[in-house]
Image (tube, coloured by chain):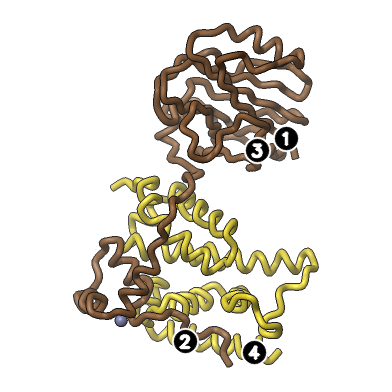
Amino acid sequence: MTVDVERLYRSHGQIVLRRARTLLGSEPDAQEALQEVFASLLRAPDSLRSASSVVGWLYQATTHYCLNQLRNRRTGARLLQVRPPPDALAPSPEPLAEVRSLLSLLPDEVAAAVVYHHLDGMTHAEVAELLGCSRRKVGYLLERAGESLAQAESA
Amino acid sequence: MNAIARTWPACVSALQLDKLRMGESVSDEVRAHVAGCAKCGEAMKGLQLDEPLPALRVVPLRRIWPRLVAGLSVAAAASVLLVLRPIDGVRTKGESGPFLEMYVQHLDLVRRVEPGEAVAAGDAIRFAATSRVPSYVAVLSLDPRGRASVYVPVTEVRAGRDVALPIATRLDATVGEERIVGVFYGQQFDLEPLRAALEGGNFVEPGGCRVNRWSFVKR
Ligand SMILES: [Zn+2]
């Protein structure tokens, strides 16, 4: 089976763009995510061929790309000695801005579990399927996220 | 209070609703629930983006450059970046042509080059013409030393979208600014006077021609 990436882009690209807007909160960054996710598909079409659901694959690829971007922003801000946006202090202009900032602090798998469960409303079973782990591990990842966030807030 | 609360407003996850929208299989239970639940129905409607997507920047190699692939060796890691910047005559959204688009091959990927995008020395470039009527197209380049050369000689192109011009060129690492001029004309034309005019700094758009221009700037 060959993957017609352009056709897939036209039919499913909106899923990537919509989620990237939510996760990144910036239109240029979301547009970049849209291009990058489909470019990665052209580089490695096998990754989709072995997936059981196209939509599921796009959720994973978008989440992975966006979480990396959020972390890069934090690193970039640090390298440039720009103060990152205050986490839980000032009233945030957009509720998700705070969430993004917190996600950038979490390890990849933990952050992904948080995105799937809290933002996408997935059950532990659905999260487990996307992460390729057990339901029990999902429970553990979400617990860990809660602890990390509580720490970040009390710091 | 935990800053990350469950923000998803429906009973069924966004993933399930997207699968349902896209015609993928979901459980009967999910299907039945969504059909009878106003909250989930509303959430599913909210997932739909009713806006056109921009063109995919990276296009499959085989579609645009079928023969080029075999003929080109993989470019060495490039140390110089080129920035493509529109001067004028570059197409605007919704314009139906004629216009020229530039594609660049970097390693084994070909992508459409957008204004302002970085292009690496050593990459190969190729042009594709879009025109509603058959026309003659040529591409000239003015290098940083002020020398004008022919990238693509006058070539007849059929009407259509993204009709690839036959010649590919590798970007060298010359420092400075390189200008690219694409010329469309309804009939066969003599390119040499245009090349000489470009080199002499007195290039004017010939009557009846449609001209697209870009420039590369080294970063
Ligand atoms: Zn419901």
Q: Is residue A29 above or below residue B58?
A: below
Which residue in the protein does label 4 denote? Answer: A151
Q: Residues within 10 Å of mark 1 (few under 14, many from 20)?
A: some
**Chain containing the residue with disc 4:** A
Check whether the beta carbons of the residues at disc 1 and disc 2 lie within 8 A of each other: no
Q: Colour of chain B?
A: brown
The kind of residue tagged 1 is Val
Quarter-of-image position of residue B183 = top right
Say if labels 1 and 4 share a chain.
Answer: no
Q: Is residue B189 above or below residue B184?
A: above
Mark 2 CB near ligand 1 (8 Å cut):
no
**Chain containing the residue with disc 2:** A
Which residue in the protein does label 2 denote? Answer: A140
**Who is closer to the viewer here, B73 or A128?**
A128
Where is residue A35 shown, x and y percent of the image?
A: 51, 51
The kind of residue tagged 4 is Gln
Check whether the beta carbons of the residues at disc 2 and disc 4 lie within 8 A of each other: no
